[in-house]
Image: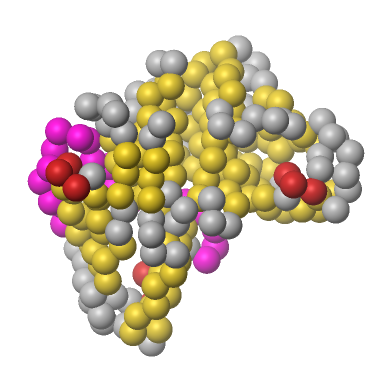
Amino acid sequence: EAQVTQNPRYLITVTGKKLTVTCSQNMNHEYMSWYRQDPGLGLRQIYYSMNVEVTDKGDVPEGYKVSRKEKRNFPLILESPSPNQTSLYFCASSLSFSGSIEQYFGPGTRLTVT
Amino acid sequence: AQKVTQAQTEISVVEKEDVTLDCVYETRDTTYYLFWYKQPPSGELVFLIRRNSFDEQNEISGRYSWNFQKSTSSFNFTITASQVVDSAVYFCALSEPIQGAQKLVFGQGTRLTINP
């Protein structure tokens, strides 16, 4: 089944404790992206990747890191999480980075930083 | 910069009523794409429709229909004969080209509640 998977789905952590949210797609998609969803703000892009070893910042990259060492994986790293990073996170992928192609979203990861 | 506005934060209707979700966008690009996504209570994002800027034909899919009007920069979504299962948060999004890639710019979302 074609899908985007994220782990963990739920995470409660404390300020400053490094964490990684994994994202994996099995569709051989070139383009992958991370978004965060906050009430009243919709979804905002954090980072994106057009292919292996090619990543770039989105609208809200501060406090986040990403890597794209393999085509299928695009982990999101929070080196020192803070409470303002409490949010719902979505990973997405699409066949290419063309605007005409819809993005497929993972199930979401709900992160709480205390 | 591109912007998507969904002015209706929450809508509540009784089952079988028709309901329209508004979406207004801003862009300087002549070629762009608009999307609608549904987020049911389970939380995942479900793709509903994509429309490119050159195609202003209205689209109908079952009880769902979309009205795209470039003159008013709107891409509204209508659910006819609403059902409880239509309860969800609906997002309108605009594809913005950024350095050769695409970024989805989302509206704030409209929470739709269908009451039995």
Asked if residue A80 lies left or right of residue B96, the reply is: right
Residue B58 horizontal side relative to residue B47, left or right: left
Give the vertical position of B2 relative to A55 (above or below). below
Residue in the picture at 41% in, 53% down? B91
Looking at the image, which is closer to me, B114 or A63?
Answer: A63
The N terminus of chain B sits in image quarter: top left
Query: Which residue is more in the foreground, B72 or A1?
Result: B72
The reply to whether the magenta stretch includes residue A21 is no
Image: magenta residue range: B41-61
The verdict on residue B55 being magenta is: yes
Q: Is residue B65 visible?
A: yes
Above or below, comparing residue A35 to residue B49 in the picture: above
The answer to which quarter of the image holds residue B78 is: bottom left
Q: Is residue A19 left or right of residue B36?
A: right
Residue A54 position within the rendered picture, expressed as x and y whole percent measured from the top left: 57, 13
Q: How many marks?
A: 0
Residue A99: x and y in percent read 34, 28
